[in-house]
Image: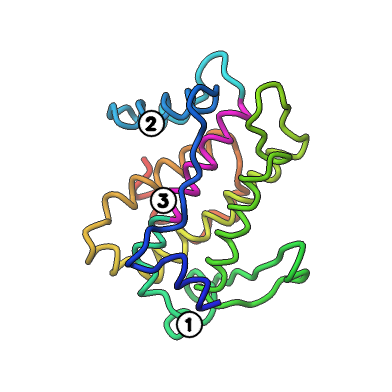
């Protein structure tokens, strides 16, 4: 697993390749629209709202991929501070512990170190968003019936990255001068998942006080 992380987050190499949208597709146009709104300085609460006439599943798909890219990069920038020794358990403080489960290697919830959990998570999300049966990119191919449930699971697990980073590594984020960027990314993520009720409110508890402070 250490080898996996070294390959993914080696400072001498690029981070995990970004998932991109094909130019000329509807989703690419939606992505451009979302990015333009972000750069225009509009209120983030307004930015996340579904544009008139657009498909909610396309809108969610665009944001899930974008959040994966952004959060993967955030974790990658401070992964050298998140080690087997510093973070032997994937947690959010003393009260919250996150165990890994998937449909292949870990069929039961399994305790992992934070670096192991992050590596499994990013691989799992990358596999899903590159799966045409889950995230179809061809025109006319419908989303699967369980699409939003899959996105809820992805976003719930990505939220746990924020929990771990804010609670265990925020000093490192401050020292790198990345606090404003991480906060903006978190606020964008939070307003989006609240706008479409994509994460159970109980999952949000670990960052409740901070969220109330920065997400007015």
What are the residue bounds of the magenta stretch?
Answer: 56-72
Residue bearing mark 1: 84
Which of the two discs, 3 and 2, labels the residue nearer the N terminus?
2
Asked whether 66 falls inside the magenta stretch, the response is: yes
Circle 3 — which element? helix
Q: Is residue 136 above or below residue 77?
A: above
Between 43 and 38, the residue placed more toward the observer is: 38
Q: Give x and y (percent) for residue 92.
A: 49, 69
Q: Sort mark 1 into few (<14), some (14-19) or many (20+) by Cα contacts within 10 Å.
A: some
- Residue 63, compared with residue 123, is above or below; it is above
User: Marks 1 and 2, how far apart in space?
Assistant: 36 Å
Task: Identify the residue at horizontal 39%, vertical 44% (top origin).
Answer: 187
Q: Counting residues from the N terminus, which is met first, the one under dot 1 or under dot 2?
A: 2
Q: Nearer the viewer, residue 66 or 161?
A: 66
Number of other residues with Cα within 10 Å of mark 2, as a class: few under 14, some 14 to 19, many 20 or more: few
Residue drawn at (55%, 22%) of the image:
26
Q: Which residue is mark 2?
A: 35
| Main secondary-structure element of the magenta-colored stretch | helix
Task: Report, in whole angstroms, how far the alpha carbon at label 3 lies from the one at label 1.
Answer: 28 Å
Q: Which residue is mark 3?
A: 211
Front disc: 3 or 1: 1
Residue at 41%, 27% (x, y): give it: 32
Identity of the residue furthest to the top in this view: 53
- Going 34% across and 62% down the picture, which residue do you hit? 77
Q: Give the side of residue 164 with respect to residue 151, left or right.
A: left
Of the numbered discs 3 and 1, the one sitting upstream in the chain is 1
Mark 3 burial class by Cα count in 10 Å: few <14, some 14-19, many 20+: some
Which quadrant holds residue 122?
bottom right
Foreground residue among 94 and 66: 66
User: Does 142 appear in magenta?
Assistant: no
């Amino acid at each position: 697993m250490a080898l996996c992380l070294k390959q993914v987050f080696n400072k001498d190499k690029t981070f995990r390749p970004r998932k991109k949208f094909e130019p000329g597709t509807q989703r690419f146009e939606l992505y451009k629209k979302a990015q333009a709104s972000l750069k225009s300085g509009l209120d983030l609460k307004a930015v996340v709202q579904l544009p008139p006439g657009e498909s909610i599943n396309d809108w969610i798909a665009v944001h899930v991929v974008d959040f994966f890219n952004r959060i993967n990069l955030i974790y990658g920038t401070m992964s050298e501070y998140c080690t087997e020794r510093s973070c032997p358990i994937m947690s959010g403080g003393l009260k919250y512990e996150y165990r890994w489960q998937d449909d292949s290697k870990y069929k039961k919830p399994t305790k992992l170190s934070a670096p192991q959990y992050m590596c499994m998570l990013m691989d799992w999300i990358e596999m899903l968003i590159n799966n045409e049966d889950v995230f179809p990119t061809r025109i006319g191919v419908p989303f699967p019936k369980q699409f939003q449930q899959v996105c809820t699971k992805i976003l719930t697990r990505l939220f746990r990255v924020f929990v771990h980073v804010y609670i265990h590594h925020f000093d490192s984020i401050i020292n790198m001068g990345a606090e404003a960027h991480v906060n903006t990314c978190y606020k964008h993520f939070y307003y989006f998942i609240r706008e479409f009720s994509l994460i159970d409110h109980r999952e949000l508890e670990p960052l409740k006080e901070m969220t109330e402070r920065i997400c007015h």
